[in-house]
Image (spheres, grey):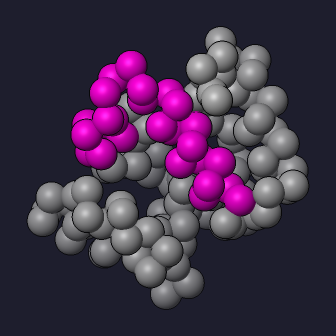
């Protein structure tokens, strides 16, 4: 249970920037028609967001990224109660980090440390 944790993004991770529609069907289902079109336009041939710099693991449009790229919008997109937003975001990140980097990866360890110290 994640009740004693608080969601926190870890820099240089980028697991959420893997937009491959085959791996993220639930994301597409939650989006409006316009959002879905933008999402699909952002998917590069390798499945990563075209705005994600894989070398530095940073978003090149972070300040102006779409609403569906903002964790504070996840609750609304997925119809999650605001009180459950942090737990939902933690579960999403854990799953995506595991898929992209592995359950015992440095990214996962850094994420677990961040959510424990961010409350």
Q: Residue at x 27, y 45 (%)?
A: 77
Q: Residue at x 31, y 75 (%)?
A: 41
Q: Report the magenta residues as a range.
A: 73-98
Tell me the chief SS of the magenta region. helix
Residue 115, relative to residue 66: is it above or below?
Answer: above
Give the residue drawn at x 69%, y 38%. 10
93 lies above or below 45: above
Residue farthest to the front?
1
Residue 78 visible somewhere in the drawing: yes
Q: Quadrant of residue 26?
A: bottom left
Left or right: 76 with respect to 25?
left
Examine the image and state in which quarter residue 100 appears.
bottom right
Find residue 112 and report its horizontal and vertical position in percent.
Answer: 77, 35
**Left or right: 21 in relation to 23:** left
Q: Is residue 27 magenta?
A: no
Q: Position of residue 29 (x, y in %)?
A: 26, 64
50 horizontally vs 9: left or right: left
* Residue farthest along the top direction in this orientation: 119
The reply to whether the magenta stretch includes residue 87 is yes
User: In which quadrant of the rendered image does the N terminus lie?
Assistant: top right
Query: Residue 82 at what x, y percent from top left?
Result: 33, 23
Residue that lies at the very extreme toward the bottom in this rendered image: 45
Q: The C terminus appears in which quarter of the rendering?
A: top right
Circle count: 0
Q: Position of residue 14 (x, y in %)?
A: 62, 55
Q: Which residue occupies the foreground of this view, 61 or 94?
A: 94
Left or right: 92, with 66 as reference point: right
Q: Residue at the location (42% across, 26% down)?
A: 84
Residue 42 visible in rendering: no
């Amino acid at each position: 249970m994640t009740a004693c944790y608080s969601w926190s993004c870890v820099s240089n991770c980028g697991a959420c920037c893997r937009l491959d529609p085959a791996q993220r069907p639930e994301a597409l289902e939650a989006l409006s028609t316009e959002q879905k079109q933008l999402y699909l336009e952002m998917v590069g041939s390798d499945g990563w967001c075209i705005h994600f710099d894989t070398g530095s693991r940073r978003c090149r449009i972070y300040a102006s990224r779409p609403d569906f790229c903002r964790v504070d919008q996840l609750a609304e997109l997925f119809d999650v109660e605001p009180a459950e937003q942090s737990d939902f975001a933690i579960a999403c990140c854990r799953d995506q980090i595991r898929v992209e980097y592995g359950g015992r990866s440095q990214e996962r360890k850094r994420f677990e440390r961040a959510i424990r110290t961010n409350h």
